Image (spheres, grey):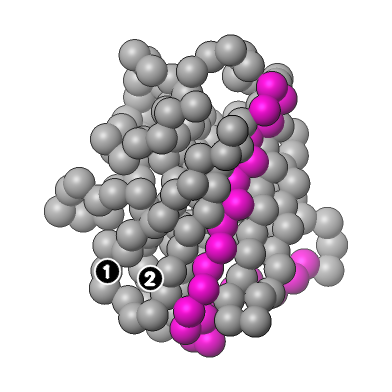
Amino acid sequence: MAIPFSLKPFEPISDLVISGRLVRSQSSLTVEYTLTGAVEELEVPPAREDTPSRRDHLWENTCFEVFIGLPDSPRYWEVNASPNGDWNVYRFDDYRQAMVAEPACKAIASTWQPLTKGYYLTLELPTEEWLANDQPLVIGISSVLKTDSISHWALKHPGEEPDFHRRDTFSLTV
């Protein structure tokens, strides 16, 4: 079953919309983002000449993110996907604690496609090696958009600062 979502900006930004859908299968999570509106000023990392790979600090540029939590557990994962195909998955033991690259995740498949007035990103995250397929998950979906400044987008922003790691932003259940 596909779960639709719409992201909200923390910082006011004109004429942009981020929506999408989340699909969970037995072996993966698929997240589809559609970014429409005034995308002319969006800074997109250039396509890579070599194979996209696991990289750190992707959130410092335009980046699409998924946060995966286990109900009744402080453990969670942060997934980062750059439009150029670079990616990373980090595991945390608790809120921003003990961050390590998730060794069981070897790759992420993503595609970045221009639209007439926007972009479409599909992110497929294989999970069978590190998440049980019958385990309920709580999900937070977010994006960082870089123009002449940084804009933070999420399902919701409950705090006074943008913070995708807060468990109360993990508002989808699959």
Which residues fall within the magenta stretch? 25-48
Q: Looking at the rendering, which quadrant does residue 125 occupy?
A: top right
Q: Residue at x 57, y 39 (%)?
A: 2
Provide residue 64's location: percent of width, then percent of height: 53, 55
Residue, far right: 50
Q: Earlier in the sequence, mark 1 or mark 2?
A: 1
| Distance in Å between CA atoms under marks 1 and 2 | 9 Å
Direction from residue 133 to residue 107 in the image, left or right: right
Q: Quadrant of the N terminus?
A: top right
Provide residue 168's location: percent of width, then percent of height: 27, 35
Q: Residue at x 66, y 75 (%)?
A: 115
Q: Which residue is mark 1?
A: 11
Provide residue 31's location: percent of width, then percent of height: 59, 46
Viewer-closest of 134 and 57: 134
- Was residue 26 drawn as part of the magenta stretch in this picture? yes
Badge 2 amino acid: Ile
Q: Which residue is mark 2?
A: 150
In the image, residue 4 sits, relative to residue 70, either above or below, namely below
Q: Residue at x 43, y 20 (%)?
A: 70
Q: Looking at the rendering, which quadrant does residue 9 occupy?
A: bottom left
- Badge 2 marks a residue whose secondary structure is strand
In the image, residue 50 sits, relative to residue 39, either above or below, namely above
